[in-house]
Image (cartoon, grey):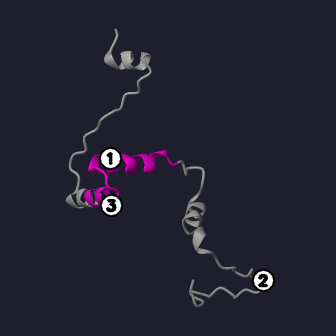
Amino acid sequence: MITMKSLFSIAGVNTMASITIRNLDDDVKARLRLAAARHACSMEEEARRILKSALLTDDSEYGLGTRIHKLFADLGGIEIPERDPSDHRALPDIFDGEE
């Protein structure tokens, strides 16, 4: 069976999918509208940008610490001196002799 999608595929034309988002919070919609205005585009285009950015960025190979580091790397850093492992305090006795 030949469908319109298969005809477009044969012709080398990429088709795009459509979705409908129901029950979107009013606050989320308002923020989407503001973001779209800041970027001088429609809300639909802004939603496409956000989804593409969120889903096509593959940070799964990195752990949480690495991702946090990447976020703040441009701000610089500090050097934390290594602690001498022989210099430690005794753990407190939380039972005070009652076991």
> Which residue is farthest front?
40
Three-letter amino acid code of the residue under disc 3: Arg
Marks 1 and 3: in contact by CB < 8 Å?
no
Per the image, label 3 sits on a secondary structure element best described as helix
User: Image quadrant for the N terminus?
Assistant: top left
Callout 1: few (<14), some (14-19), or many (20+) C-alpha neighbours within 10 Å?
A: few
Instruction: Report the span colored magenta.
Output: 33-57
Three-letter amino acid code of the residue under disc 2: Asp
Label 1 belongs to which residue?
A: 45
Q: Position of residue 81 (x, y in %)?
A: 73, 82
Three-letter amino acid code of the residue under disc 1: Glu
Per the image, label 2 sits on a secondary structure element best described as loop
Per the image, label 1 sits on a secondary structure element best described as helix
Q: Measure the alpha-carbon separation of dots 3 and 2.
A: 52 Å
| Picture quadrant of residue 91 | bottom right
- Sequence-first disc among 2 and 1: 1
| Picture quadrant of residue 40 | bottom left
Could you tell whether 88 is left or right of 36 in the image? Answer: right
Q: Nearer the viewer, residue 14 or 97?
A: 14
Q: Position of residue 35 (x, y in %)?
A: 32, 59
Label 2 belongs to which residue?
A: 84
Q: Measure the alpha-carbon separation of dots 2 and 1.
A: 55 Å
Label 3 belongs to which residue?
A: 38
